[in-house]
Amino acid sequence: MNQRRPAVVVLAAGRGQRFRGEGHKLEQVVGEETVLAHTLRQAIASELPLVVVTSAALAPLVSPHVAARDMLVLPDQDRLGRPMPVGMGHSIAAGVAATGDAPGWLILPADMPMLRTDTLLAVAQALSDDPIVFAQYRGRRGHPVGFSAELFSELAALKGDEGARRLLARFPSQPVEVDDPGVLIDVDTVEDLQRLRGADPSAPTAPAGASGQRARMNLLG
């Protein structure tokens, strides 16, 4: 790795189908900000290069927070009017390809509003030593997950809902232990949202439940 910094790829294109409340999970308000705004605020504060991968439907929610150059809006249809494939794998591949000159990438789901900026920086720093690193809190694997530039081809080839578990099986990965329970907290269900609203987004105190664990597993595989 050289002196350039890895890019943060924020995944904000999913349909959030497990969230049964009114509206999309990313537009739910916690405190004075949306779930998405909390996540983006921490990512922007890191001053790492940033790309937010989103859909046409969610682009209006993203655009007030980042410059147009930092948004990648996935098309709904191809040139023949056929539906374009969607999924976490496609989002990761698109974000990595759009920042292909970066020395690495931190993959961050957009529904993690309690993640701290210093965690992003710690994971980014760790990429100088290992091809894959991931945030860990008290022995529990969380996000973000970092990948070095040597894995560009593998990441850019991901499809559909295929995650990156096979890359962790093929390449060495190392945990980055952080004092940040926010690495385990996402908003996947209405219950997650209710639990989050009972906490202070600026001072996370409790890890996510089973649904958060499933979301983390989905990203990795």
Image: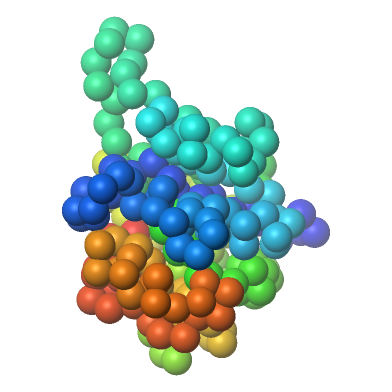
Res. 218 visible in picture = yes
Q: Is residue 142 above or below residue 163?
A: below
Q: Quadrant of residue 193?
A: bottom left
Residue drawn at 66 percent across, 74 percent down: 118
The extreme top residue here reads 80
Q: Position of residue 200 (x, y in %)?
A: 51, 77
Which quadrant would the C terminus be assigned to in this image?
Answer: bottom left
Residue drawn at 25 percent across, 21 percent down: 83
Which quadrant would the N terminus be assigned to in this image?
Answer: bottom right
Number of callouts: 0
Residue drawn at 30 percent across, 44 percent down: 23
Res. 74 visible in picture = no
Q: Is residue 167 above or below residue 59?
A: below
Q: How is the image coloured?
A: rainbow
Q: Quadrant of residue 44?
A: bottom right
User: Quick check: 218 left or right of 156?
Assistant: left
The extreme right residue here reads 3
Nearer the observer, 11 or 37: 37
Residue drawn at 29 percent across, 25 percent down: 84
Q: Position of residue 9 (x, y in %)?
A: 53, 50
Q: Position of residue 8 (x, y in %)?
A: 59, 54
Nearer the observer, 165 or 191: 191
The extreme front residue here reads 32
Q: Position of residue 28 (x, y in %)?
A: 39, 53
